[in-house]
Image (cartoon, grey):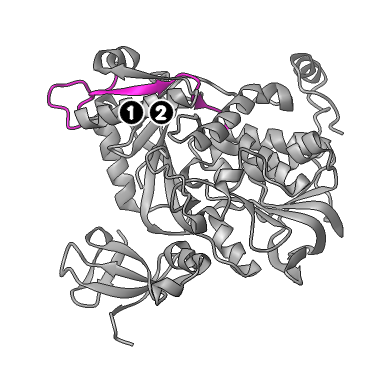
Amino acid sequence: MQMIACPWCGPRGEVEFVYGGEAGIVRPVPAASVDDATWAQYLYGRHNEKGPHRELWCHNGGCGQWFTMVRDTATHVVVTAEKIGAR
Amino acid sequence: MTAFRYSFLQVLRQGLEGHRGWAPAWRSPPLQKRYDVVVIGGGGHGLATAYYLAKVHGVRSVAVLERGWIGGGNSGRNTTIVRSNYFFPASARIYDLALRLYEQLSAELNYNVMLSQRGLLTLAHSDHAFELAARSVNAMLINGIDVELLDRAQIQAEVPLLNFAPDARFPIHGGYIQRRGGIARHDAVVWGYARAADALGVDIVQGCEVTGFRIDNGRLVGLDTGQGPVAAGAVGMVVAGHSGALAAKAGFRLPILSYALQAMVSEPIKPVLDTVVMSPTTGAYVSQSDKGELVIGAGLDLYPSYAQRGNLPSTQSILAGLAELFPSFRRLKLLRQWAGTVDVAWDYSPIIGPSPVEGLYLNCGWGTGGFKAIPAGGYVLAHLLATGRHHEFSAPFDLRRFETGALIDEAAGAGIAH
């Protein structure tokens, strides 16, 4: 079983967690002046990295907290798992 | 040209002559300095693209660049299912083109792709799911697809091995079947396209990774590869799960995420299952190969991944679902398990058409259903590369739909758990 170290609870099995998508996506504002291409990139464009990928996870089977994790998508090695805003 | 056509007489003759006359099915030529068209990716879609370029459009200066080897990626990792039972007209049109081409493919390629149209049964495990199945069937019939709604008794007659016990965890309320659906031999499809494309003069270059794009004034003029640079009039990018990684090298992002999609096979047993069974509720789908193994497919793993192995919780949940559907399979041993890296677009429909870089064309986003679409994906991309314009079947799948909002949401049509 893949283990993930929740920054609040410590190491737990992956089944306790839910993936929440790429981290750091910022909604473009003001909405009225955002063109279609920018809006489409915000909604759908993703880096889809092969390698270290910064992403959001939620420990929904434990403390329920969201946190930021850097995970290597090629090897599944968890590089860092930090509380949101730790950096 | 290929040395000879495959035939029964040829098998007989070679048998009498000690099998010394068989030649390799395709050449291994060195990479030339320039081609009219370069196709990145030697999977089914890439090879089919090259074949139809040469066959339909007479474009013979074509190279297919494959980082690994032919049949080593998703082409050799899928569950070999073919079908065209999709909800939206645009999807039904392109997937049924694929199925119709599959029906002629063995003769067309002079290569037995072992197409077996044994029917593909999709199960409904509740009254609500059965109502939705009826709605899907109506849409598919309007699309001209051969599907039949089946009630519980009809399904019991089709597949008596399924769990019809009164206390079944996933009771069978009905379902629908596409009788033209079934399976084909996945290796044979890629090998057949490779051999036929090679015979028409296409250079298939294996072990040749694309490392960079040469872009001049917004237009793609060539590629850097592990075997040196190559100039190209037009380039097709057909790399499935690695589309995002290559797009980044060309300077743009795609609305695609790469996931592991698992498959596994049981130990071989005597024939027990003569159709393909899909159960969207449990996420499992299964058919029996000619060798007797049960070929089991799973839903997507729960987070993006490029690791071609899949994670244990998904394996467990699919096998638990299968054991519940087919109680008699519980004692079988699992022989092998693996995963392919699939490119999933947000609306579970493919992306075919021009990329943001002029001269670079896309065929990606087939996600969990690439194998069944190989002939059509190749056919329409060849049209794009040869003419610079969409085939009418590929136009709805243009990348620009993510800006216009004209998405083709086949989350249900994709048929597996997401």
For the view shown, which residue lies furthest in the front direction? A32
Q: Residue at x 80, y 20 (%)?
A: B14
Image quarter for residue B330? top left
Image quarter for residue A25? bottom left
Q: Is residue B222 visible?
A: no
- Residue situated in front as seen by the camera: B155 or B380: B380
Q: Residue at x 60, y 25 (%)?
A: B100
Lateral position of residue B62 relative to residue B146, left or right: right
Is residue B165 part of the magenta span, yes or no?
yes
In contact (CB < 8 Å): disc 1 and disc 2? yes
The vertical placement of B179 against B403, above or below, is above
- Residue situated in front as seen by the camera: A48 or B188: A48
Q: How far across and down, in percent of the image, does residue B68 sit? A: 65, 53
Query: How many numbered discs, if any?
Result: 2
Do marks 1 and 2 share a subunit? Answer: yes
Q: Which residue is mark 1?
A: B135
The residue tagged with tag 2: helix, strand or loop? helix
Callout 2 amino acid: Ala
Q: Is residue B166 visible?
A: yes
The CA distance from mark 1 to mark 2 is: 6 Å
Q: How far across and down, in percent of the image, does residue B396 sit? A: 56, 44
Q: Which residue is mark 2?
A: B139
Q: Callout 2: 10 Å neighbours few (<14), some, many (20+)?
A: some
Q: Residue at x 77, y 41 (%)?
A: B53
Q: Callout 1: 10 Å neighbours few (<14), some, many (20+)?
A: some
- Magenta region, residue range: B161-185
Callout 1 amino acid: Arg
Q: Looking at the rendered structure, which numbered label has been put on residue B258? A: none
